[in-house]
Amino acid sequence: MRPSPHPLDLATFQEARERLCGRIVRTPVTHLRSGLVAPGGGVDERGVLTTPAVDERLPGDVWLKLECLQVTGSFKARGALNRVLSLAPEQARRGVVTASGGNHGLAVAYAGRAIGAPTTVYLPRLTPETKATRIARWGAEVIRAGEVWDDAHAAALAHAERDGLTYVHPFADPEVVAGQGTIALEVLEQAPDTDAIVIAIGGGGLMAGVGAAARLLRPGIRVIGVEPVGAPTLHASLAADRVIELPSIATAAGTLAPRRSDPYTFELVRAVTDAIVLVTDDEMRDAARYLLDSAGVGVELSGAAAVAALLTGKAPLAGAKRPCALVCGAGTDGR
C-alpha cells in the first residue's frame, strides 16, 4: 500500500470528535454471536449487546456498528456536521448547498438547521420522495437535478459558485472525512479486539475516514471495502490506478452509486484499503432481511452491504477473527 499524500493524523479525528460531542449519537455496537450466547451473557461493561444470529452463515462472531441509529439515520451526520461547524460565521450566514443521493442531504439539512444556516440540497430524480420530504422537514430547500448523483453534484456546484455559497461535498473534503473517521474511535473503544473493519463505499469518504483512523489506532487492522456490482467506482479506479468515471450505474443502492469518485478520496482509500469486493443488489437485500431478523434493525441496501460481504464469504478476512461490519444507513429499500 502507498502512503497517502493527504495524511490525517490522530489529532484531526480527536478534534472532530470533540466538535461533534453532544450533537450526534455514540451509536451502539452489537455482538452477533454464532451459536448460543454463554450463560450470563447479554450486555457487557462497555454496553455491547450480545445476541445470537438466526443462522450460521457468518464467519464466527461479528460486531455490528449500528450507524443506522445515528441522527438522520446514517453516519453522514458526522461528516456534514464537522464540516458545517467548521465554517466561519459569515460563511454560515450566507448558507450551504450540497448534492446527495439522500443520506448526505439529510445530514447537511440537519447540520444547517443546527447552526441556522440556509441550506439547499440537490437530489437526482431517482432519490425516493420519502427522503426528499424528510430533508425538507429539516428546513432545507430541495431541488431535483439529473438522473444520478453526479448530475445533481454538477448543478449544486454551479449554484454554489454563482451565489457564493459553501458547497459541502459528501466525500471529497478533509473535514467530512475526519467526521466519518470518528466511527473508528468509537468502534475500537466499544469492541477493542476488532481486527477487521468492513465498510460500504459510495464516494469513499466513509472508507477513507474510518480506514485512516483505524490504522492510526491499530496499524495491523484489516480494512475491507464493499461496493455494488452495478457501481464499482473505487474498485475499478484502484484496478486502473487512477480515478475513472463509470459509463453507467446499475444498482438500486442509490447512496452507493456515484459514477466517479475524487482524486482526494481515491488517494486516501488507496492508502488504507486491503481489498474492495463487490456484492449484488440481491445479496444486499438478503443481508438487510438478515439484519432485521438477527439484530432487529431495518436498513436500506447500502446499510446492509458490509454484512452482505460477510454472509457471502466475499470479504477476504485473511485470518481476522473479530470483524466489525459498519451498518451505515437505515431505510426500507432492502425488503
Image (cartoon, rainbow, N blue to C red):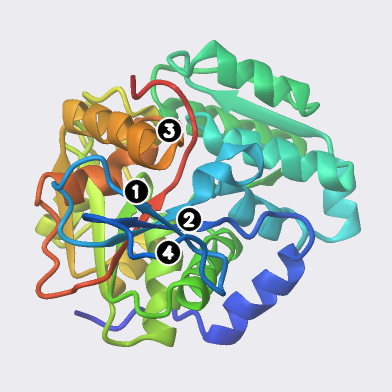
Residues at marks 1 and 4, CA–CA distance in whole angstroms: 43 Å
The residue carrying mark 3 is 299
At label 3, the amino acid type is Val
Q: Tell me whether circle 1 and circle 2 mark residues in contact (CB < 8 Å).
A: yes
Q: Could you tell which of marks 2 and 4 lies nearer the N-terminus?
A: 4
In the displayed structure, 277 sits above or below 218; it is above
Circle 4 is placed at which residue position?
A: 41
Q: Are marks 1 and 3 in contact (CB under 8 Å)?
A: no
Q: Quadrant of residue 130?
A: top right
* Residue type pointed to by label 2: Ala
The local secondary structure at tag 4 comes to loop
Determine which residue is flagged by label 1.
Answer: 261
Q: Secondary structure at mark 2?
A: loop
Going from the N terminus, do you reach mark 3 or mark 2 first? 2
The quadrant the N terminus occupies is: bottom left
- Crowd around label 1: few <14 · some 14–19 · many ≥20 (10 Å): many
- Labels 2 & 4 near each other (Cβ < 8 A): no
